[in-house]
Amino acid sequence: MVDEQTADTTQQVTSQIPATRVITKNPKRVEAGKKIAEKRRQAREEQNKKLAEAEAVMAKERLRKAEEEARKAEAVVDPPFEDPVVAETPVETQASNLTTTQWLSIASIIVSLVAIYYKREEIKGAIAKIKAPAKEPTPLAKEPVLSAPKKKGIRSMD
């Protein structure tokens, strides 16, 4: 009785006919999939290399800036000793350190002043015309005054 109670009564039904269809993959598709996977892997590796190079460049830049800030802070804390004899020697003036844009601005101002200087007669004449009242020229012959013909029909109530 123990065998009857413990035995599994549910059995799977299987076919006695062997499977005739064998699934085969298209070798061209398999090869194309492998090539695509290889290209993607190479692209990922290339991208990782570029990211590593960019991070290295950024790290070098941060290090350079940090060293520069440290030098500035050190120069502020410990100013270098200056020999009074060396300090009395004339130092070159740095007033000639104008940028190209500043030089162009100065040149344009000078050119505009020169142009105004040469056109001063025209400017004087224009100012004189503005200040002087405009005189109407006297006509030699009186022109007839033209008036519109009166409308026939309903008159206005003026």
Image (cartoon, rainbow, N blue to C red):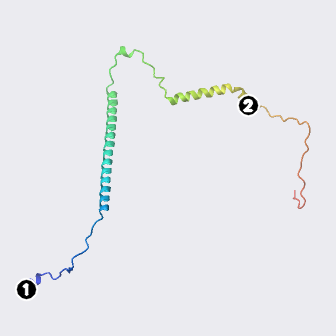
Residue 11, percent across and down? 17, 81
* Identity, as a three-letter code, of the amino acid under mark 2: Ala
Whichever of callouts 1 and 2 sits on the residue coming sooner in the sequence is: 1
Name the image quarter holding the C terminus: bottom right
Q: Quadrant of the N terminus?
A: bottom left
Q: Nearer the viewer, residue 60 or 35?
A: 35
Q: How many marks?
A: 2
Which x, y percent locates residue 81? 32, 20
Q: Residue furthest bottom?
A: 1
Residue drawn at x 61%, y 27% is 111
As measured in the structure, the alpha-carbon distance from the residue carrying label 1 to the one carrying label 2 is 132 Å
Query: What residue would you read off at disc 2?
Result: 126
Picture residue at 38% right of the left edge, 16% below the top: 87
- Above or below, 55 against 69 in this view is below
Callout 1 crowding tier (Cα within 10 Å): few <14, some 14–19, many ≥20: few
The amino acid at mark 1 is Met
Query: For mark 2, does the 10 Å Cα neighbourhood hold few (<14), some (14 to 19), or many (20 or more) residues?
Result: few
Q: Residue at x 30, y 52 (%)?
A: 41
- In the structure shown, which secondary structural element does the residue marked by tag 1 occupy? loop
**Residue 1's disc number:** 1
Q: Nearer the viewer, mark 1 or mark 2?
A: 1
Residue at 63% across, 26% down: 113
Name the side, left or right, on which 127 lies relative to 22.
right
